[in-house]
Every structure is written in C-alpha cells, then in structure tokens.
Amino acid sequence: MALIVDTFIGDPRSRFHPVVLIGKAISFWESVFFRPAAGAKKMISDGVFLVIAVLLSVALPVYMILFILAEIHYTAYIIGCIFILYITITPHALARDAKKIYRCLADRNLPEARRQVSWIVGRDTAHLEESEIARATIETVAENIVDGIISPLFYFWLLGPLGAALYRAINTMDSMVGYKNERYLYFGRAAAKLDDVVNWVPARLTAGLLLVSSAVLGFSARQAWLMMRRDAHTHPSPNGGYSEATVAGALGIRLGGYNQYQGKTEFRSYMGDPHEKIQRFHIRKTVQLMYASTFLGTLCITLLLLLGEL
C-alpha cells in the first residue's frame, strides 16, 4: 500500500513533510552540540550525542503516534504504518527527477538539464555535457535505490514502522553532517559511520535485487554480476558501489571518473566497462531497474511479513 501511494501521489514538497521536520531537528541539535573550538575527541563525542538526541527526537513521537492510533483502532494503526513507510521510501521522487533531466536532454536544453541535475548531485554542473549529465543522474538514482528504497523496506521488516523512521533519520543525518570537510570531519563521524553500518546489509541485498531485475528486463545480468564483484569495493562508500557497479554492468556502461566539487577536480574509481557510451536513454533504463528492484524488494518484504504472521 505504501508503494501504491508513492507511485500515484509521490513525495509532496512541503516544509511540513516529516523528513523536513527531521532535518530541522538535526539542525537544532547541531546548534546545541557543535562547538567549533572543541578538539577532535570532543567533537567526536559531541557527534555521538547529536546522533542519540536526533534518534530520540524521532523515536518518541513516532512511538506515541503509533500507540495512540493502535488505541483508537487497529485500522488506524495500519494506516499510520502505511503513511510512515510511504514517507520513508522515494521511488517516485527519484523517477520524477530523473525523467525531468531526461526530457531536458531530449529537448537539447542543456542549460536546464544542468540546473535540474544540480538539485540532485553535489558536484559542479555548470559545464557538464550530455553524457556527464546522464552519468551524474544514473549514479544518483543507482546509489539511492539503497538509501531511498531498499534500506527503509528492510528496517520496516526488521523493526516495523519505527525502524523505517529511524533509518530515515540516520540517513538524513548523514546527508547533513556526514561530510569529510573542516566542519564535519570529526563532528559528523558518528552519523556517517552509523549510516555505513545500517546500509551494509541492504546495499548487498539491493545488488541481488538488481541482478534479478537485470535478467527480467533483458539487460546483462552476467555483466552486472561481474562488475559488482570486480568494482563495488572501489567506491568511496563501503555500500554505494554495490548498486552503482551492478547498474553499470547491467547497462554496459562505465560510471565514475572525474568530477568537480567547488572548482576542485576529484577522481572516483571507474565502475563497469564502457561497452556503450553513456546517453540519455540509459537514464530511462536505470529508472526501469530501480522500479523493478523496488517491486521485487516490496514483494519479498511483504512475503516475509506474511510468513511471520503464520
């Protein structure tokens, strides 16, 4: 039901969206615990307090809401569970953003495509050509199959709606403070490491789902397997490479390479072999892989939940 709601309604952009509220809670607790003059050890410990405070700030209201709904009626509780899972998964938003970029490229509107892709990636986009815009889009969609879909589903199965909500809080913390820059190198370390830990299993499950999806869609499941085995560990993240390398292999393209961040050029290890030059139609194929994996993951979690009721 959560997937159906997301498919037809999508993720509304609102300052009252629960994930936006989680972001505001993170910003509040950061203002409480962050001390620029503190030493490395103090910053790391303060970062741990930030993680604890944010998780409690999410867990307590979610638990209370679910408890109240359960007291009202079981149906109200189920609707609450559906809503929480719905706001923690993002297949519709990923597809929406990718399709906007695809349409801009199809219309040969590179300036608008650069502007659109700048909303979903951290790299500099002002001078990207079509193939680089497509690569940035594909990498973002592929990596977010883990963060935005399979991980919330996994923790919903493991810990219920509270698990999905806590996962979203952890992932949002990582996206806000989990950077290796001067401000967050130590303060954001706890959030970043926790995000790595909670995504470890889902990332590898996602690779398996992508392999099956590749076979179902007629892409190269064999190459997807080989590239995942060969290249996944070369990604800067211990988890991000499992989806990106698998997608690269399935589509016969090469991801990674040189990116610019605030004028500085950085190299990310290549994943996949360039059997085909990256073009805009590879964005559509990546979205197809994303939705197939989402459907398979949802089906698996649903069956596991049903088996748990027997």
Image (cartoon, rainbow, N blue to C red):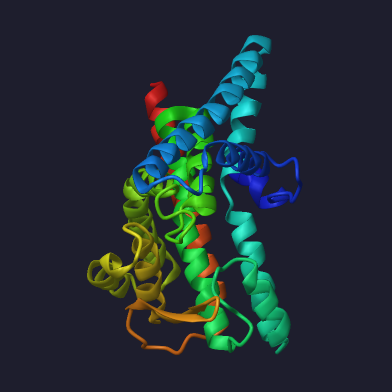
* Residue placed most toward the observer, 3 or 248: 248
271 left or right of 102? left
The spot of residue 163 in percent (x, y) is 47, 32
Q: Residue at x 41, y 55 (%)?
A: 185
Q: Which residue in the rendered view is the most extreme toward the top? A: 71
249 left or right of 69? left
Q: Quadrant of the C terminus?
A: top left
Can the viewer see residue 156? no
* Residue placed most toward the observer, 217 or 83: 83
Q: Quadrant of the N terminus?
A: top right
* Residue placed most toward the observer, 264 or 275: 264
Q: Which residue in the rendered view is the most extreme toward the front? A: 37
**Quadrant housing residue 92:** bottom right
The spot of residue 98 in percent (x, y) is 62, 69
Q: Residue at x 61, y 88 (%)?
A: 127
Q: Is residue 137 above or below residue 130?
A: above
* Residue placed most toward the observer, 175 or 251: 175
**Quadrant housing residue 17:** top right
Q: Is residue 258 above or below residue 35?
A: below
The spot of residue 125 in percent (x, y) is 60, 79
Q: Is residue 249 above or below residue 11?
A: below
The spot of residue 97 in percent (x, y) is 65, 66
Can the viewer see residue 189? yes
Q: Residue at x 69, y 76 (%)?
A: 115
Q: Is residue 116 above or below residue 158?
A: below
- Count up the numbered dots: 0
Q: Residue at x 39, y 74 (%)?
A: 248
